[in-house]
């Protein structure tokens, strides 16, 4: 059992909110594994729905003032390579060009980097084309896929998904609502970015962009902006700063090493009787995967389904056909894996089981709130600092009456010219944690290119407080925690505050095996 010291007792009572425990797709029933757990009929792992300007409606009696968009990267190559998989992955002809810009020259033999002599500005370096190639002569070639993709790299399809999403967002936030300018112009008076405040980074440009440092999230963000502002809708010289954190300090993913309690919580939940019932329920499909992929006994595939989801669903999304039947009793499984081997039924069952794990650990287990708090809480804290800043600006403009207690004491961000649209490009777990925190009824494993859009609306009646609307893949989030079609800001803020850790000490609770 997880230690019930004073810290965890206080957290448990702090996080409990009556009426939040039941959902339509509950992972458990009467304290046992729910074998009838299902995904919604409209769920599609390969292609999510997006907002549509034809059906999108503004909040009645209010004007949109600010938008935060959290996305999962688009379609990608697999991360895990099973022993028998000889498939080739091609990430397309589009290439990343890398170069350095800015700075001044200094004499490396006479000056340290801390005492640079100004020998004049540096010109841009030559552009280097990034080309991935899997050499057939490498002794390690069997550990990666043949072709032009690095493990987990965004594919052409993944880039196209986010360009399409960007065009959909343009139709709403530029053409329909006028929140963003029609044309993206060169920055006129942008102050240099401050190391302690990345929100200054884009000066007059009304967009803030942040992603994790991995290629697939960076290029997803670039692709979305390319759809939002295509070449004929941006000035030739315009450029945007793109904020990334070192992976070890990233807050859009759970930090298993830096936060030992986060890992301890997962281990405790995996040791639960309910999880053992779940493992027993899927022995047949795990046996099938082990037979096909040659993965029996491999750590990456043991007692979890995430690696099977990675292998099968990435393949399923790229098959030319989606067969209803495949004879899996093949004498040559490696040859079978080169065909369209993932049936509709296998794909559906695979992603349903993977979704069960996501829902159980992040929303439905008794420790799920603590797990989500440590998994995404510091990212919520970053978003919350922004909420208070533009909430205060909204109050000054509207004279609305609302609880003035800040969500965080002394928010660390000071903004002179705030962006009105913030884009955060993350991973499936980023959206899964956020969905769980919101209490989403039909929570599932986030599809490629999924998006959560948080809109802040100012009522025309200046005596009312700001309203928050939350959309998941184009639809209003259904939840018992708030009416997310027009959630009062103070209620939204109090809800999200439950998931912000008080301090890093919450990561240092003793390991469950050593209470």
Image: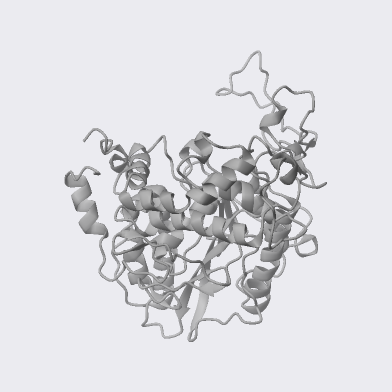
Nearest the eye: 304 or 153: 304
Left or right? Give the position of 300 relative to 218.
left
Residue 246 in view in this figure: no
Q: Quadrant of the N terminus?
A: top left
Left or right? Give the position of 263 relative to 40.
left
Extreme residue toward the top, this view: 109
**x 32%, y 77%: residue:** 401
The quadrant holding residue 461 is bottom left
Residue 165 in view in this figure: yes
**x 53%, y 34%: residue:** 298
Nearest the eye: 201 or 126: 126
Nearest the eye: 51 or 121: 51
Give percent across and percent down for residue 447.
58, 59
The quadrant holding residue 86 is top right
Give percent across and percent down for residue 340.
74, 53
Above or below, 398 relative to 317 = below
How many numbered discs, if any? 0
Extreme residue toward the right, this view: 93
Left or right? Give the position of 181 relative to 258.
right
Nearest the eye: 38 or 260: 38
Above or below, 31 relative to 59 = above
The quadrant holding residue 369 is bottom left
Q: Quadrant of the C terminus?
A: top left
Q: Which colour scheme is used?
A: one colour
Give percent across and percent down for residue 378.
40, 49
Give percent across and percent down for residue 349.
55, 59
């Amino acid at each position: 059992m997880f230690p019930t010291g004073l810290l965890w007792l206080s957290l448990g009572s702090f996080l409990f909110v009556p009426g939040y425990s039941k959902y339509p797709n509950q992972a458990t029933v009467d304290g046992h594994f729910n074998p009838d757990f299902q995904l919604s009929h409209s769920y599609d792992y390969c292609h999510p729905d997006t907002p549509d300007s034809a059906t999108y409606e503004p909040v009645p009696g209010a004007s949109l003032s600010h938008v935060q968009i959290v996305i999962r990267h688009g379609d990608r190559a697999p991360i895990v390579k099973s022993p028998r998989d000889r498939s080739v992955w091609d990430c397309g002809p589009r290439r990343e060009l890398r170069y350095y810009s800015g700075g001044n020259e200094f004499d490396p033999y006479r000056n340290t980097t801390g005492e640079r002599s100004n020998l004049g500005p540096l010109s841009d370096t030559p552009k280097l084309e990034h080309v991935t190639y899997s050499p057939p002569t490498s002794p390690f070639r069997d550990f990666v896929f043949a072709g032009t993709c690095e493990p987990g790299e965004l594919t052409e399809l993944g880039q196209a998904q986010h360009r399409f999403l960007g065009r959909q967002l343009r139709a709403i936030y530029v053409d329909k609502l006028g929140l963003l300018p029609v044309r993206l112009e060169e920055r006129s008076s942008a102050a240099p970015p401050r190391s302690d405040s990345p929100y200054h980074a884009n000066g007059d440009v009304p967009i803030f962009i942040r992603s994790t440092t991995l290629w697939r999230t960076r290029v997803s963000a670039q692709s979305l902006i390319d759809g939002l502002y295509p070449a004929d809708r941006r000035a030739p010289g315009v450029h945007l700063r793109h904020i990334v954190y070192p992976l070890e300090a990233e807050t859009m993913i759970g930090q298993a090493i830096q936060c030992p309690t986060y890992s301890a919580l997962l281990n405790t939940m995996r040791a639960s009787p309910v999880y053992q019932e779940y493992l027993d329920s899927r022995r047949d499909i795990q046996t099938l995967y082990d037979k096909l992929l040659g993965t029996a006994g491999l750590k990456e595939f043991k007692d979890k389904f995430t690696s099977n989801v990675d292998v099968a669903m990435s393949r399923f999304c790229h098959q030319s056909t989606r067969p209803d039947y495949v004879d899996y009793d093949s004498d040559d499984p490696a040859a079978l894996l080169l065909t369209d081997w993932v049936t509709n039924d296998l794909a559906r069952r695979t992603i349903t089981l993977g979704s069960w794990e996501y829902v159980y650990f992040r929303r439905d287990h008794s420790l799920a709130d603590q797990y989500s708090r440590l998994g995404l809480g510091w990212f919520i804290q970053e978003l919350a600092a922004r909420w208070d800043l533009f909430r205060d600006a909204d109050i000054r403009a509207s004279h609305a009456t609302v609880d003035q207690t800040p969500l965080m004491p002394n928010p660390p961000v000071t903004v002179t010219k705030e962006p009105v649209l913030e884009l955060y490009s993350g991973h499936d777990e980023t959206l899964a944690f956020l969905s769980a925190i919101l209490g989403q009824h039909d929570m599932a494993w986030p599809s490629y290119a999924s998006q959560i859009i948080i809109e802040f609306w100012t009522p025309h009646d200046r005596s009312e407080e700001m309203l928050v609307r939350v959309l998941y893949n184009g639809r209003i989030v259904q939840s018992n925690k708030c009416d997310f079609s027009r959630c009062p800001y103070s209620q939204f803020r109090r809800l999200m505050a439950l998931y912000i850790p008080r301090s890093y000490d919450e990561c240092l609770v003793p390991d469950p095996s050593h209470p």
